[in-house]
Image: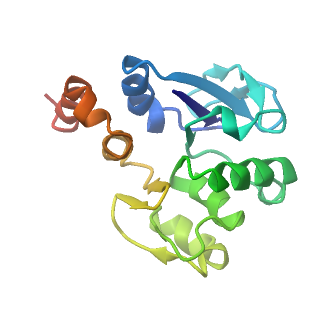
Amino acid sequence: MKAAFIALDECALWQVAMLQKILYQNRWAWRTLTLDGRPVITDGGIRLMPDSSVESASPRDYDLLAIAEGNVSPEQLEQTGLQRFLRQFDAQRSLITATGLAVVLLAGTGLLGGLRFTTNESVYYDFGKLFAHSIYTKEPVTVDGNIITAKEQAHLEFALAVCQHLGISEKNPASLRQARNLMRNE
């Protein structure tokens, strides 16, 4: 199984770190994509080298897409390569995940139309027009169809929800115990 991580400039790598660890422990390959194929700097100053650009990647090569919060600009919302990738990924009904501000990319591409979703309240209010045809929940994590969204601070709950959706909790309960222990600070 293969996961694609779209790394935006200033991406919050910590929001997907636990998920990445659990997937790796369960023999998933994790590939990093950037919008232009160039390295990005995370919000913690780590330089990420991409495996590919979104433009040259094929959605059918991946079983999961993860996007963590990062800088989202109006130009990115209109970038045809990103929109194409997201729409093609959604069309194959593979799992799409986004945290915090990254949820705006899904809304801007029309993937949240009619679906329940969550994000931080400030994001919801700042980008209200993009969410006009979606149903906002105040939950830490929301699952609707093949899309999982999360508030930026719900990274552990997010990892658990994704793993439950993928069936990892049944296949490898030890991975999930570790995440649950972290949630309880044990």
Depth check: 137 or 55 in front?
A: 55
Q: Is residue 5 left or right of residue 135?
A: right
The reply, left or right, for residue 102 in relation to residue 122 is right
- Residue 63 point in image, percent of width and height: 55, 37
Residue depicted at 70% across the width and 31% down the height: 33
Return the residue nearer the eye: 76 or 27: 27
Q: Position of residue 98 (x, y in %)?
A: 53, 50
Quarter holding residue 15: top left
Residue 61 in which image quadrant: top right
| Rendered position, 163 above or below 72 | above
Work out whether residue 8 can be spotted: no
Q: How many marks?
A: 0
* Residue 127 against residue 29 in the figure, above or below: below
On screen, residue 146 versus residue 4, left or right, reads left
Give the colour scheme of this rendering: rainbow
Quadrant into which the C terminus falls = top left
Q: Is residue 145 above or below residue 23?
A: below
Left or right of 153? Residue 124 is: right
Residue in the image at 66% along x and 22% along y: 48
Residue 129 in picture, x, y percent from top left = 66, 79
Front position in the image: 58 or 113? 58
Viewer-closest of 126 and 129: 129
Q: Quadrant of residue 108?
A: bottom right
* Residue beneath the point at 20% across and 28% down: 173
